[in-house]
Structure formats: structure tokens, C-alpha cells
Amino acid sequence: MSLNGQAYIVGAYEHPTRKADDLSVARLHADVAKGALEDAGLTKDDIDGYFCAGDAPGLGTTTIAEYLGLKLRHVDSTECGGSAPILHVAHAAEAIAAGRCNVALITLAGRPRAAGAALSLRAPDPDAPDVQFELPFGPATQNLYGMVARRHMYEYGTTSEQLAWIKVAASHHAQHNPNAMLRNVVTVEDVVNSPLVADPLHRLDCCVMSDGGGALIVARPEIARQLKRPPVKVRGAGEAPKHAAGGKIDLTWSAAKWSGAAAFAEAGVTPADIRYASLYDSFTITVLMQLEDLGFCRKGEGGKFVQDGGLISGVGKLPFNTDGGGLCNNHPANRGGVTKVIEAVRQLRGEAHPAVQVQNCHLALASGIGGALASRHTAATLILERV
């Protein structure tokens, strides 16, 4: 079953806070749900499907549904890290097409910054089968991505300066976002001269850590057409996991190679048709890998693609993350997928900041990576269309 045209995103909202000292996680979920409902022109009584992941407290969908007072006939708590909200949009479209629900709410929220604990500091699950083999070697998010970056450099000659251009582009966009955590424009020299975190990645190659969250509302086409907000059609979707394969792993590509191919095939378009891309940016290397694996450039040519402002709106070939992304704006609950869809919706509606709004933006892509590129992760890709 094709999802092309089966559902529309009718509501989107991003929480303005970046440090939630006085807000609970449940309250953050409620705030973003309320914001998305108001954006769509709906009420909570219109919601009959709810989607969330492991960031939700308690029993996840059950706990938040009770907290929000939702009466539901479909729930989905698919968990795959930062890509989960992007998958949830596709799963919501599937549920709507199958008649399981009419209007689906997707929420993400968290407060790791206020709590003073990063995702990497959580104790490993002793029942996870990989722990006994990997934990003795000290894996951490930053050094896992550093391995990928170093391998890419070895195989293709990619440089730290080329990776730095990704941060530079994000900073050029973030300067126009009043809520962004890092609003100062940086240079390539600023990035490569920032402290080394995990060779070859520097501090400014890494995303911010923030509180907050976001929400999306996906609805049946006939409902979308009755609302006042510009509807955004789900035209194509893809999802795929990649794992360590018992040690037989090639670090030069990600699961976006599979998820992107599926999304483009379903949408009936090519990378050349995309006007704007929201790309998961936990690290600069994460963006580079997705650009290649999604087909925006050939494998190994990502460095050339991004250098000299290739991702800057109004300057480069492919404007990306015009809100500043995870590198400069926010990375709520250490899961940036929902904000990628939100900014894509803004671009398609023509509601991005005028300084970064892409002209004639009718097709956009949102891509997410959940997990770690050097070990196990799930990629999700959405192709969205303005109608």
C-alpha cells in the first residue's frame, strides 16, 4: 500500500524553551500537544490516534493519553531513538489509511538539560546482548561518531574543514531564530579550532543538548481540506535499521541509504526535485553521511557538496536545517527527529524566517537517525509536499 496522499500534516508546534527548570516532562508533552492542536484548529476531542516513544514517562502512550484526557482507538509507541517521530508520521499515515484513526497526535518532550544528565550517562541495559562485548571498550556517542568521521576521511579524503562548513551553514540560519541556543555565526576556523571532543570531531561539530520538544498532527485528507492551515501531504516514507552485523560492518554508509530509496520510490521523485532538506544533525558527520546516502551527491563527495556554503539558504545547492537544527537551535530530549519535520512543514507553508525561507518550496525532505552510526541505528525518511 502506498502512503502517497493518504494523510496530511495539519498541525506543528515546537516548544520555545531550551531549559525547563520548572516544567515536568508530562507538562512539556501537554504544552506541545496544545500548541499543535491550536496550530491545526482542532481540539483534543478530535484526536483518536496517539504516537510517542521512550521519551514519554511512565507507560508512554497510556500515561500521556491519561494526562491529556485523550479518548483513543489507536496508539503506537515505536521506539528507535531520534528517528522515532519521523517514523511516527509514516505510521500515522498507515493507520489513517487502514481506518485505525482519523486524526493522529505525535509528541516528543524531555528535560535532560535541566536534569543535568545526558543520554550517554545512563547506565547500560544489562540485558542488552551487545553490552558484554562492547562495554569493555568504552563506547560513547561522541567516540562512535568520531569513528565514522575518521573512516570517511580515510576512505574519501574528507577534511575537518569540510565538516566545519555544515556547522557554519547551521549558524548562518540560527542567527535568525530567537529561540536558538547558539545564535552567533561561526567560521570554519572557529569550528576546527574548538576543543577536540572525539578525534576528529571538535566541540562545534557536536549538537547542543536542550530541553523542550515538539508535536505534529496528521489527519485524513478530507479533514485536512476542511482546516484553515495549509495542508502538507505525506508523499513518501521509508524506514530501515542497520546494525553491527556481528562485526561485519562498513562505517562509510548509513541506513538512510535504504530508507531514502524507499521514500523516493513511493513519492515518485528524485533528490534533484527536493527544494529543502531537514537532516538529522547530532554531529556534522551525521549530515554528511545522509547527504550521500539519500542521493544528493555521490558517496565520498559529501565534503565537496557542503563546502563553501553548499547548505546555506539562498547561497547553496540544498538549503538545510533553516532553524539552526540540532547543531545550533535545539536537540530536545536528545531526540531531534520531531524538529526536523516541524521545520520542513514551516518551509512548505512559507512560514520559515524570511531570511532563510526557500523560494517556491513545494517539496521537502526530513531525515532522521536514531541510535549510533558506528553500531546500531534506524533511519527514517519523509518526503513532504505543499498542496
Image (cartoon, helix red, strand yellow):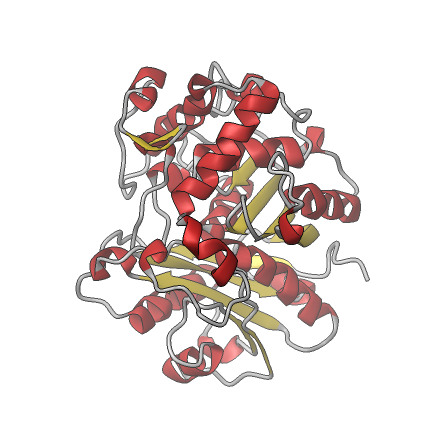
Between 279 and 341, the residue placed more toward the observer is: 279
Does the rendering let one see residue 180? yes
Residue farthest along the left direction in this orientation: 22
Q: In this view, does 204 lie to the left or right of 360?
A: left
Question: Which image quadrant: the N terminus?
Answer: bottom right
Vertical side of 100 occupied by 375: above or below: above
Q: Is residue 185 left or right of residue 151?
A: left
Does the rendering let one see residue 321? no
**Image spot of residue 314 (x, y percent):** 49, 21
**Image spot of residue 269 (x, y percent):** 76, 38
Q: In this view, does 221 lie to the left or right of 280?
A: right
Q: Residue at x 32, y 37 (%)?
A: 177
Q: In this view, does 97 lie to the left or right of 223?
A: right
- Quarter residue 14 falls in: bottom left
Between 65 and 294, the residue placed more toward the observer is: 294
**Image spot of residue 262 (x, y percent):** 75, 48
Tell how many labels.
Answer: 0
Q: Which residue is drawn at 45% across and 32% down?
A: 284
Q: Residue at x 37, y 58 (%)?
A: 213
Q: Which residue is drawn at 56% across and 27% down?
A: 152
- Quarter residue 215 falls in: bottom left
**Image spot of residue 174 (x, y percent):** 34, 33
